[in-house]
Image (spheres, rainbow, N blue to C red):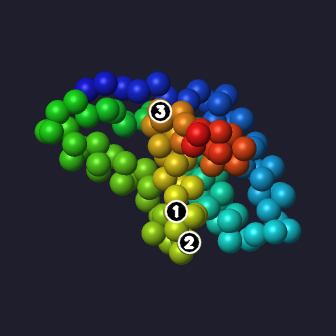
Amino acid sequence: MTKPTFPTPEEIKAIIKKIEDKMYLNKISSKKKNKGFDKCLDILNDRLKNPENPYFIAESEEEWDQVNEIFKSQLKGIEDLKEVSNRSMAILCVDWLNGTKDSINFLNKKQYEKSKK
């Protein structure tokens, strides 16, 4: 079992600020998109309150079920999001919290476009 490098509380707070800024800008253009951001804020704030992350990188087949259950528990509530894009935001947010640094690119469209090249 290997633990990935998780974001620090300071990094989480910086992402919360970015999301809040985007939500402010989106109030005019897209209320639907804000539902995904709302879920991300819930997930991020929950991690600040409960900093222990049980996620790990599975190194054997026996560990896959355990990892999948942890990931599912971290995504609790996304089934309430009707838009696929909103569920995707929540999944990327959890991925980022679990150590996949590139997952947070959805916050910055220009950065996301660069990463696709």
Nearer-the-camera pick, 23 or 8: 23
**Res 11 visible:** yes
Q: CA distance from mark 3 to mark 1?
A: 19 Å
Percent position of residue 62, x then y: 14, 39
- Marks 1 and 2 in Cβ contact (< 8 Å): yes
| Marks 1/2: CA–CA distance | 7 Å
Is the residue under label 3 in contact with that under label 2 (CB below 8 Å)? Answer: no
Under circle 1, the secondary element is helix
Taking the view exactly as shown, the residue that stands out farthest to the front is 117
Q: Considering only vertical position in the picture, is 109 above or below 4?
A: below
The label number, if any, that marks residue 99 in the structure image: 3
Q: Earlier in the sequence, mark 2 or mark 3?
A: 2
Q: What residue is shown at x 61% (from left), y 61% (from top)?
A: 36
Query: Left or right: 63 with respect to 16?
Result: left
Q: Amino acid at mark 2?
A: Glu
Residue sitting at 53 percent across and 75 percent down?
82
Q: Amino acid at mark 3?
A: Gly
Q: Residues within 10 Å of mark 2 (few under 14, many from 20)?
A: some
Residues 54 and 35: in front is 35
- Secondary structure state at the residue bearing disc 2: loop
Hey, what amino acid is under mark 1? Arg
Which residue does the image show at 85% across and 68% down from the upper left?
A: 28
Picture layout, residue 86 above or below residue 72 = below
Dot 3 alpha-carbon crowd within 10 angstroms: few under 14, some 14 to 19, many 20 or more: some
Determine the residue positioned at 81% across, 69% down: 29
Q: Which mark is residue 87?
A: 1
Left or right of 110? Residue 83 is: left
Residue that mark 2 sits on: 83
Image quadrant containing the N terminus: top left
